[in-house]
Amino acid sequence: MIKILVRARFAAMLAALTPKKKNQDPNKKPGKGMLVLMLVLYLYLGFIFMMLFFSAFFGISQIYLPSNMGWMYFSMFVILSFAMMFIGSVFTAKSQIFEAKDNDLLLAMPILPRDILASRMLVLLLLNYLMEAVVAVPAAIVWMLFGNGQFLTWLGFLLTVLALPFFGLAISCLFAWVISMITAKLPKSSFVTVAAFLLFFFAYFYLISNAEQYLTLFAENGDAIASSLGGILPLYWFGAGIADGNLWQLAVSLLIYILPFALTYYLLSRSFIRLLTTKKGSRHKVAEKASVVRAGNAQKALLKRELARLCSSSAYMLNCGLSIPLLLIVAVAAVVKRDTILSVFSEIGWNGINNILCCCFVLALCFLNSMALFTAPSVSLEGKTLWLIRSLPVSSADILRAKLKMHIVITAPVNLICGIVLAIAYTPSIPVILLLLIAPPLYCVWIANIGLICNLCHPVTDWINEAQVVKQGAAILLTMLFSTLPVFVLAAIGVVLAIFSYWLTLLFVCALIMLGVVLTYRYLMRGGVARWEGISA
């Protein structure tokens, strides 16, 4: 049974990457082009992270290997691997185990709850192995180049690589359990989940971005840091069991990795049904009040519906709205580091450095907006309830407009605020100020149109968990590609035209974006409406 459940989970994930075309024979296998494209993208991202960790392990090896402190090298490997797996799987565990769409259906079947839990955890375990590989491969290569080739060392490293994901999964599931229990009692649980994720996310990337400073600190205080961490026996055992080939320490380390997983599985399996059937929402009683219900505008009602759908899903907000805090962070950082940025670029000797920097900020804002993908999964998220919105006395065009407005209402004001802040801080010329204020919000409209078109062309309504369409859907990948590539075109045009006049840059860049907006909107109101009406739930 576990094998069948795991197979169904992977089949659903692949279906999100290779959606069937309209009127396609259901017995015919879908094309693999999108799957290959998604695989190439993931391999590219994995390569980028591997290079990052290779640089980190190279620096660590230069500090500790000459001093015969190989245990510290492998302790750092364990710490970085665990951090990578924890950040990458804690919220996935929350959605896959406790919030999957098919939980009620599976519990109604003659399937043991522990088998359902085991299948979910097995999928997450495989995900942990993939994330660990991003850290383990660079660590192994650096050790191969600068460490020793003892058999026991490589055996210990291999056993650690096989066992460590169990420990990472155990901690991730426990944290996901706690978060689910807390959010189950809160009326705004999605915002709590988003806040927790952003805290973990920015803390992790803050550490990664300051890795060079930490490596310098390691180099200056290597012995003191090693002695401090060496006082934490488990950390010392983790590293020494591999580096020194100490079988006793290695055995203790493997027990520490595996026993928490067994305990976590036991605890979750005993309370799995109760966890899944916990009533969501606030426990506070709401006093009933008599009120007059007034008729409202249909477009406003549809927009509120889209915003409510967004706010009710932490996965939707996290995966499609990550650029919103990033935009604000970039704007604030550009203002705080204004003097440093100007001094660095002034050494290059460019004329009109403020104008050039602000043009770069325009491109940066447009690029960050490519991660705002609210419309890309909006059609697929209707799922099996697609018939409900179709039964409303509103036109298909109005429904699509509401999805576009939801994206624009969220992203355009943020871009406008960032443009105003940067214009005040850097005081560029008037055409560049207008470019800052017009181009990024206009680009948001382009992305909204592209995202909705991609989802109408590649809808997935038979998803099991909404993470499939907000993380892995073909529409998400295509929207990212089609919203990122034009940035490079705008950059090329801007560089050429800025040589002659910033007014020309303003006119051509805005006109080009506006042309794309008009053409895509016209398609949505014609071909898009037809595709919407032809989607089957």
Image (cartoon, grey):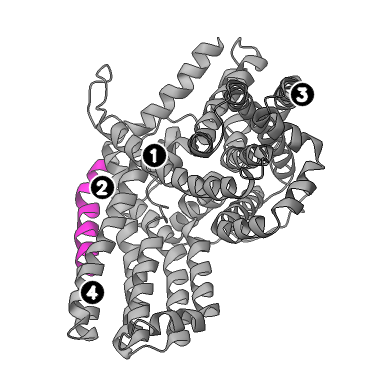
Q: Which mark is residue 267?
A: 3
Residue type highlighted by circle 3: Leu
Residue at 51% x, 18% y is: 6
Q: Tags 2 and 3 in contact by the CB under 8 Å rule?
A: no
* Rendering quarter of residue 385: top left
Q: Tags 3 and 1 in contact by the CB under 8 Å rule?
A: no
Q: Tags 3 and 4 in contact by the CB under 8 Å rule?
A: no
Residue type highlighted by circle 1: Tyr
Return the x and y of residue 76 as percentages of the image width and height: 64, 42
**Pointer 4 residue:** 494
Q: Which mark is residue 529?
A: 2
**First in sequence: mark 2 or mark 1?**
1
Q: Which residues are magenta?
A: 513-531
Q: Tags 2 and 1 in contact by the CB under 8 Å rule?
A: no
**First in sequence: mark 2 or mark 3?**
3
Q: Nearer the viewer, mark 3 or mark 4?
A: 4
Residue type highlighted by circle 2: Val
Q: CA distance from mark 2 to mark 1?
A: 32 Å
Q: Tags 4 and 2 in contact by the CB under 8 Å rule?
A: no
Q: Which mark is residue 42?
A: 1
Q: CA distance from mark 4 to mark 1?
A: 31 Å
**First in sequence: mark 3 or mark 1?**
1
